[in-house]
Amino acid sequence: MFNRKIYGQLQQWKDTRAGKTALLVEGQRRVGKSTVVEEFAKKAYKSYILIDFSTCSQEIRNLFSDISDLDFFFLQLQLLTNVRLEERNSVIIFDEVQLFPLARQAIKSLVKDHRYDYIETGSLISIKKNVKNILIPSEEQRIYMYPMDFEEFLWAIGDNVTVPMLELLFSKQKPAGDGTHRKIMRNLRLYSKRQK
């Protein structure tokens, strides 16, 4: 798991909102939203359920057609996923939520119930077909996840020194030196190739 800056935002949401809102993580496809959110769930909660709407069963989708009895809803969800949820210590993740708008609409009732936390991930969340015929929940806090930046790339290759050194050099208005400059430029070229 690569260290990503958004992880701190996830923790801040959990600590400050305490289940009063769901978290919607938006971003381009393939930037690591699902990976970061699941890793966070593993570390920050006793249990979690990940519902990937690009692959989940019709049985799970059918649960969202009637959420008037949340006791029954959660019981069925736990049975279908074989995961036990713990009140105020579990999170339910709606991955690729744009593919199943009914689940996103359910957030209002689920957050109001306050038993569990909810994180949604998705791309193209706001386009018309992904919000057609649903009420957009006001109980969502949105954050945007961007592709890996240069500092995160350096962390991924084990370099925790370059950025603090550059900040120090910049604040003192000093040059990096030829060898350091070559190393930074080589890493920048590697990062640029990875972004294409």
Image (cartoon, helix red, strand yellow):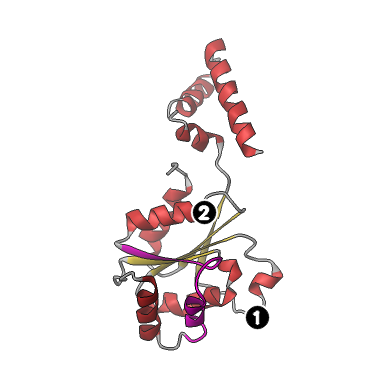
Residue assigned mark 2: 33
Please identify the quadrant where the C terminus is shown. Answer: top right
Q: Residue at x 67, y 76 (%)?
A: 132
Which quadrant holds residue 15? bottom left
54 relative to 84 in the view: left or right? right
Name which residue type carries label 2.
Lys
Name which residue type carries label 1.
Asn
Element under disc 1:
loop
Residue assigned mark 1: 133
Locate residue 53, reporting x and y percent. Answer: 54, 68
Q: Nearer the viewer, residue 52 or 191?
A: 52
Element under disc 2:
helix
Task: Work out how far the residue at label 1 is from the one at label 2, CA to CA, in angstroms.
Answer: 26 Å
69 relative to 103 in the view: left or right? left
Q: Nearer the viewer, residue 130 or 178?
A: 130
What is the magenta range? Answer: 47-66
Locate residue 160, reporting x and y percent. Answer: 43, 29
Q: Residue at x 52, y 16 (%)?
A: 180
For mark 1, does the 10 Å Cα neighbourhood hold few (<14), some (14 to 19), or many (20 or more) residues? few
